[in-house]
Image (cartoon, rainbow, N blue to C red):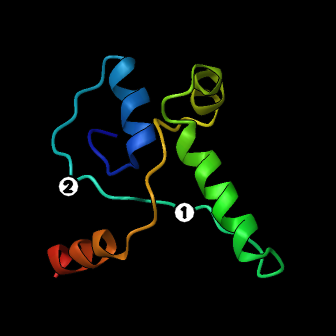
């Protein structure tokens, strides 16, 4: 294959192996972590705070790396709305 479209994680691996990136789209959230409706609002809030705290925690670097995630951002529907408008 001479060219293709891949998700950002695959693109990074491809580039690390000597591949070339021809074009990148705007950065946007491309996946979400979800919680069971059985979780209480306070449990969801605590878990959200924990996930966000991982961004700067030394103990979390290996965990984030193993998940191939750079960090987490708070949920914000504006990013998805902007993406939808950009795609149109």
Left or right: 44 in relation to 76: right
Q: Residue at x 57, y 27 (%)?
A: 65
Secondary structure at badge 1 equals loop
Q: Residue 54: x percent and y percent? A: 57, 36
Residue 32: mark: 1
Q: Who's the residue at 46% across and 35% down the image?
A: 70
Q: Which residue is drawn at 20% across and 55% down?
A: 26
Q: How many marks?
A: 2
Q: Which mark is residue 73?
A: none
Instruction: Pinpoint residue 49: horizontal percent, then vertical percent.
Output: 59, 52
Q: Is mark 2 on a helix, strand or loop?
A: loop
Among the 4 quarters of the image, the one containing residue 77: bottom left
Mark in front: 1 vs 2: 1
Above or below residue 17? Residue 22 is below
In the image as oriented, which residue stretches furthest toward the front?
42
Q: Examine the image and state in which quarter residue 85 appears.
A: bottom left
- Real-space Cα separation, disc 1 to disc 2, in angstroms: 17 Å
Judging by the rendered image, the residue that carries numbered circle 2 is 26
Q: In this view, does 31 lie to the left or right of 38?
A: left
26 relative position to 35: left or right: left
Q: Which quarter of the rendering shows the C terminus? A: bottom left
Q: Which of 63 and 88 lies nearest the eye of the viewer?
A: 63
Q: Closest to the observer: 32 or 2?
A: 32
């Amino acid at each position: 294959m001479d060219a293709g479209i891949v998700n950002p994680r695959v693109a990074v691996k491809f580039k690390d192996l000597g591949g070339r990136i021809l074009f990148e789209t705007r950065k946007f959230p491309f996946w979400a972590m979800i919680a069971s409706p059985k979780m209480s609002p306070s449990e969801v809030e605590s878990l959200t705070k924990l996930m966000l705290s991982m961004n700067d925690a030394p103990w979390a670097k290996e965990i984030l790396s193993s998940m191939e995630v750079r960090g987490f951002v708070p949920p914000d529907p504006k990013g998805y709305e902007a993406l939808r408008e950009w795609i149109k």
